[in-house]
Image (spheres, grey):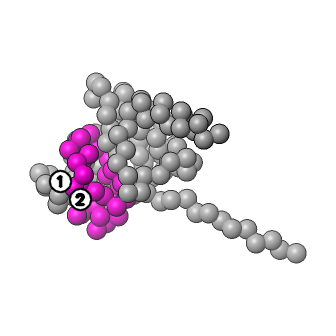
Amino acid sequence: MLMKVKWKSPMIYNFFCDENITRKLEKTIKRCGYRDDSERNQKLFGVSNGDLVKYLNTHNFTLITFDKDFLKSELSVNQGIIILDVKPNRDEFAVPLLEEFLVMLKNEKINCIGKKILLNQDFFRNFAEEVEEGD
């Protein structure tokens, strides 16, 4: 007798890197198995945040940026916004942080649809505390 197995397909994210995201961070996204595009590739330099949000929503992208202006309530991306918050703002700090986040995303421990995520070390500390409280 054949059993029906419901397969839950993982959420697929397509990331869009803001103009302030380095090539090393873009490579990290690809290395983690995600697709990405960027302002650099699309030659969208200097576009306003409002116009960028329209573009992202039209093409179903999740934004990755260092720009905290995206925390403003009027800037909302359907697929979510990830704001990297590392000090100092250097790849040797940002890459491992982003890698850890992308692994959690891939393992469906978090999702960013419709959310604004301020990604820093406190994010993981707070996430661990929330998981412990939920047990």
State the image coordinates of residue 2 (x, y, percent, origin top left): 83, 74
Local secondary structure at mark 1: helix
- Residue extending farthest to the top is 88
Q: Is residue 69 visible?
A: yes
State the image coordinates of residue 98 (x, y, percent, origin top left): 41, 38
- The residue sitting at 26% across, 45% down in the picture is 71
Q: Is residue 130 above or below residue 73?
A: above
Local secondary structure at mark 2: helix
- Quarter of image, res 99: top left
| Contact flag, marks 2 and 1 (Cβ < 8 Å) | yes
Tell me the number on the disc at residue 49: 1
- Could you tell me which quadrant the N terminus lies in? bottom right
Q: Is residue 88 above or below residue 59?
A: above
Closer to us: 41 or 105: 105
Q: Is residue 97 above or below residue 59?
A: above
Closer to us: 35 or 2: 2
Q: CA distance from mark 2 to mark 1?
A: 6 Å
- The residue sitting at 23% across, 54% down in the picture is 75
The amino acid pointed to by label 2 is Val
- Quarter of image, res 85: top left
State the image coordinates of residue 123 (x, y, percent, origin top left): 43, 35
- The residue sitting at 22% across, 55% down in the picture is 74
Closer to us: 78 or 47: 78
- Residue extending farthest to the front is 133
Closer to us: 133 or 22: 133
CA neighbours of label 2 inside 10 A, class few (<14), some (14 to 19), many (20+): many
Residue with the mark numbered 2: 53
Q: Is residue 23 visible?
A: no
- Residue extending farthest to the right is 1
State the image coordinates of residue 25 (x, y, percent, origin top left): 35, 40
Magenta stretch, residue numbers: 54-81
